[in-house]
Amino acid sequence: MDQETGAPGRRRFMALAGLGAVAALSASGCTPSDRTTPEPSPFNGAMLDAFVARRGGPIGTDGKIAVAFRCDHHVNKFSSRLLPLHQKYSIPVTIAAMSQMPVVERGPNGSDLVSFQMLQEYALQNGFEIGNHGATHRDAASEPRLRTEIVDARRSLGRSLPKLPIELFIPPGVGGTDYMGFKGGGAVSVFSDTAAGRLIMGEHALSTGYVRGFWSMTGEPRANLGMGHIPFESAPVIARGPEHIARARRQGRGACFMYHPNGLSEAGLKALEGFFEWCASERDAGRLEILTVGGLMMARIDSAARHDLLADTGAGASWDGWGLSGAQWNLLPEDGQPFARSRAKTAVMGKTFTPGIHAGSPRQLRVSLRSRTGCRVRLEVFDAGSPQRLHVAKEVVLRASTVFVPVHQYLTLPLTGTGSLRVRITATGRGCDVRRPELLAA
């Protein structure tokens, strides 16, 4: 699964000499973090390069803070209760998966009812990311056991999920010897000073951990090594989500929220749906970005540059390559950005692209739509050679309005087996306006 990229101009991102204080989250609020100078760590250069190249470099958010959501295993309940919420609000998630979770987690709150093939399909269809959470979620008190839990687990997940890159380690809380003193990655230094940390960094591009605070948004992924999360498992805590985001905004940093599906009561699920709805509305209003955990590691708040697989090779925001038939579409100017207006009862446009070194990356299909009379729009991304290998679709019903509405659909580009992909947009009804779609790193 390790892939080296031969992309021209490939560069390694250098660790920052000093990060400054990051906010530590506590029950009472934020206190300064001790993370001011990261210790050197033995990064896997090839995997880190591939991780960065997959996303096309830093993910610029143009002044907006970014958030990410993480689900820790228990995928039976995730599939039945959480997956529909992520789909309803078009919110990606990074799933911390164990290579042996179907065996060690059984029953309604376990992971034995969702096959790895199903998990892979969830990821491809919804822009999810899978991280290595160890083999069994148990302590490892010797180096051979560490290798089983860290190295063998990642490689096993890679074999079970061949269309997804397993790039991140997400340390489990194990107790006992805490992976022979690794202690969940509670300090940056343990990634180089412990046997577990060295194995993690030798086998993965990056790792999360338990370093408390909001996440750096400098575009330097190593600055987020070992960063932790805000637990989201009860209704009162989830209700404080907007407060956390407000504090992160004041600091110009990102936030990662984590839940265990089995830890959410009915009240917790209701509160989480409310927070998802709020985050989606903030995103639609242009005040928030929602990324995967890997995307959050790459986020850069002081830049608008973000890799777009549908970007034109020429100058300006043209529609080159979209095959706009004159019988079906008119190109019209507005605010310096030409948009396409359907002129037939059914109007179709499409563009084919090759993932190349970006294969395996979570992506956000973003397009703004408008109709003054109301219409239906179907968004699709599919394997151009064999749609049965990948076919992601979203139906949108537009009410009559003079305002463009942003629409989002996340997906993950298959790591293997797909040579080219096609985006297709079908408008049913005349007078449907489409601004040029983007397929952004997420």
Image: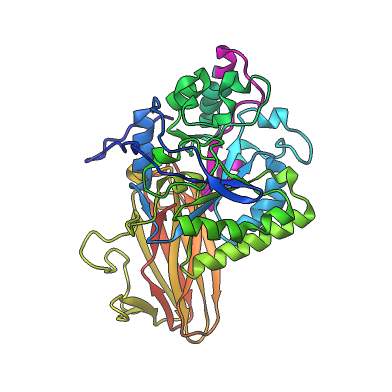
Residue 208: x and y in percent read 52, 37
Q: In what quadrant of the picture does the N terminus appear?
A: top left
Give the quarter of the image for residue 324. bottom left
Of the pair 59 and 104, the residue shown nearer to us: 59
Q: Which residues are magenta?
A: 119-146
Task: Please state which of residues 288 and 395 is positioned toward the viewer in this rendering.
Answer: 288
**Which of the pair 339/66 is nearer the observer?**
66
Give coordinates of residue 125: x percent, y percent.
54, 51
For the point 58% across and 56% down, the residue is 244
Which residue appears at 34% of the width and 53% of the height?
A: 307
- The location of residue 420, given as percent across then percent down, is 37, 49
- 41 over 406 or under it: above or below: above
Give the number of marks.
Answer: 0
* Residue 148, image quadrant: top right
Q: Is residue 378 visible?
A: no
**What residue lies at 26% left-to-right and 65% top-to-bottom?**
320
In percent of width and height, residue 13 lies at 31, 38
Location of residue 429 with respect to 418 vertically, above or below: below
Q: Say left or right for 22 vs 307.
A: right
Q: Is residue 208 left or right of residue 438?
A: right
Residue 126 is covered by the magenta coloring: yes
